[in-house]
Image (cartoon, rainbow, N blue to C red):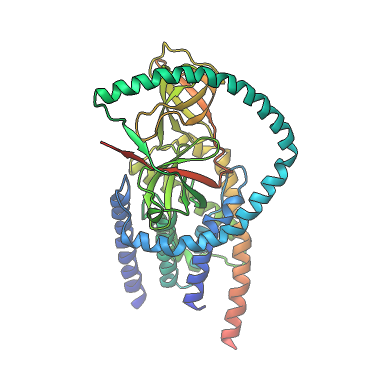
Amino acid sequence: MNKIIILGILTANIILQTTILNFLTINGATLNTTLLLIIVLSVYLKPRDSFLYALYSGLLLDTVTGVFIGLNTFIFLLLAYAISIIQEEIVKESYVTPLLLGIMSIVIYNVFSLFFVYLMGYTVRFTHYFSLNTLVEIGYNSVIMLLIYTQFGKFYNKRMKEVKY
Amino acid sequence: MSKPFFNRRIAIVITMLLILMIIFMGITSGERQEVSEIERWVGNIITPVQRAVMAPIHAVQDRVYDLANFAQLNQQNQELQEKLIEKEQALVEVRLSMNELEELRGLQEALNYIPAETYGEPISARIISKSNADWFNVFTINAGENHGIIQDSVVLSQGGLVGRVIEVGDNWARVMSISDSNSSVSFKVLREGNVEGIVQGSATENLEGYLFDPRMEIEIGDQLVTSGQGIFPAGILIGEVTEIGKSREQLLDAVKVHPAVDFQKINRVLVLNTTDSN
């Protein structure tokens, strides 16, 4: 797929995530669609491409919303790399895969964010993040992950067939 | 043959990038006097798009708000008229006190004492984006340096204190709300001006804080206003006390405060520049 189109989609997604998607909260839990997109792209695309998208999205999201730069980029790159290592073992057709990846990515994102925010000297209330809210966030993002994953999968497979013939 | 080499090379590049990100975090964390040119440039490109995306939402919000509140307006009108009569009576008493205040001001000038803060014209702005991470309660507004906003400008809304400006771009500024765990505001009780303390944002929607002097009395329902210590000018409504207890050390009276501003619903804010005349 054309790199520029994907970069455009990622940019549009970041704009939506920081504006409209803030209104679609469940019990305060928000969607992290950029993270979900990076995971989906890392599962389907070449590692080198997915690293580029992780780097671009992370830096843009950090610049647009972050109190400090590097946090999102670090986590996106790390997750893209981790998925690139296990990419060949992933059962792409299973519906369990996106759910597991959704849960895993949100947990890793939260753990690393908490760690770095704490490390950078900001106040963190740890107890809050081991509450019902976090479970809602994991569930909410996993369901959306399932949607993004299946739709992208269909599109990707169709595109691959077109390229073959 | 080439795959392990490729993997190793990729691993090295990724590791270097990760280390670079940690260095970036270290450099950019904490209070910065100015945003970098790249951040300013990206902000100048992205914020107009965010503003355009939010424009229809703001329009709908305004209409829905007007419609939803129409039924309450008559009742509010009557209540306000009654309050107005009460306030007019109170005004007479205040005027008497003002005379005393004028005398004190005269004395202040005579002693060559300069007031700590002066405020410029308030700048009206709208919220165009929010950070959706839990760790920070930070949002972006559609006014910046070109509108006269500076770092540490005070941000208010209809209800009361919202927060302070932490980063400024040309036509945008980033605001850290008082509900952020990293914000702290010194307060005094409106009912009893000498009862003072400090509140901080918490992980919940409420603020948490304590009194400086545990011997002082505070009650549930007391309204808290800024005390004037720190960057926030005195007298801005912070919220209402909802719970009183002992702090973990059992030495200080801990308070839970429901903020006057509904941070989930605000979309319009006022920015005040507090410039030190000294």
Residue depicted at x 41% and y 22%: B197
Whether residue B211 is visible here, answered yes or no, is: no
Name of the residue lying farthest toward the right: B71
Task: Assign the C terminus of chain B to one quadrant of the image.
Answer: top left
Direction from residue B205 to residue B211 in the image, left or right: left
Q: Quadrant of residue B182?
A: top left
Residue A29 position within the rendered picture, expressed as x and y whole percent measured from the top left: 57, 46
Direction from residue B56 to residue B272 in the image, left or right: left
Direction from residue B232 to residue A134 in the image, left or right: right
Q: Quick check: B104 above or below A66?
A: above
Q: Quadrant of residue B198?
A: top left
Residue depicted at x 47% and y 12%: B217
User: A58 or A91, which lies in front?
Assistant: A58
Direction from residue A6 to residue A150 in the image, left or right: right
Whether residue A26 is visible here, answered yes or no, is: yes
Name of the residue lying farthest toward the bottom: A165
User: B127 or A132, which lies in front?
Assistant: B127
Task: Assign the N terminus of chain B to one quadrant of the image.
Answer: bottom left
User: B86 or A82, which lies in front?
Assistant: B86
Residue B14 position within the rendered picture, expressed as x and y whole percent measured from the top left: 34, 63
Q: Quick check: A151 above or below A158?
A: above
User: B223 or A131, which lies in front?
Assistant: B223
Q: Quick check: B114 above or below A10?
A: above
Residue A156 position within the rendered picture, expressed as x and y whole percent measured from the top left: 58, 74
Residue A146 position within the rendered picture, expressed as x and y whole percent measured from the top left: 62, 60
Q: Quadrant of residue A70?
A: bottom left
